[in-house]
Amino acid sequence: ACLNHQVSLHHIKAHGALYNLCAQKKEYAEFLTEVLAEAYPEIPVYVPFDSEMSRVATGKLKVLFEAFADRNYEPDGSLVSRQKDHAVITDESALIKHVLRMVQRNEIKTLDGGVLKVKIDTICVHGDTPKAVELLQLLNQKLEENQIKKTTVSCK
């Protein structure tokens, strides 16, 4: 579809369940990496830090580590299931604090109070998060106020 409209790809990211499967299961990560390396070897792929996908794709694809501004994390680095309370961060101040910690300290506070050390290249805000556009605008403002360099702020 992109070729028909002469649009270039900025990045590639598995979506939803496939993203989670590739993060957790080596066989899925290997399959997706093989497909992407053959079809789009020059396009960066967004992956969670310290995931199966990051381990498999590193050296074969350009890997950018992604974190989620609007989601809470489990101690193992996975996202809290949307079926649980507190999966989505909708409070503006909590979201800003969450993201600033990610980019300033390279860490994510987990739902149980633990800390994950991470590397982050890109931050996602889900388009279905309540007030996603307003959250992005506020996030953009706060990143500028804290003199944090960014290239783009976008939602999925």
Image (spheres, rainbow, N blue to C red):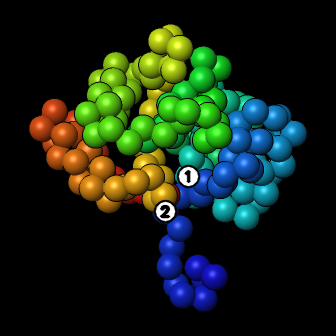
Q: Is residue 35 above or below residue 48?
A: below
Which residue: 48% across, 40% down? 88
On the image, the x and y values in percent for residue 90 come to 38, 42
- Which residue in the rendered view is the most extreme toward the right? 27
Q: In this view, does 4 lie above or below 100?
A: below
Locate residue 58: give its quadrant: top right
Q: Residues within 10 Å of mark 1 (few under 14, many from 20)?
A: some
Closer-to-camera residue (131/142):
131
58 with respect to 22 (left or right) = left
Q: Which mark is residue 10?
A: 2
Q: How crowded is mark 2: few (under 14 residues within 10 Å), some or many (20 or more)?
A: few
Q: Which mark is residue 44?
A: 1
On the image, the x and y values in percent for residue 82 come to 61, 41
Q: Evaluate if marks 1 and 2 touch, with contact meaning CB atoms under 8 Å apart.
A: yes
Q: Can residue 122 be seen in this view?
A: no
Which residue: 84% across, 49% down? 31
Closer-to-camera residue (3/124):
124
- What type is the residue that disc 1 sits on? Pro
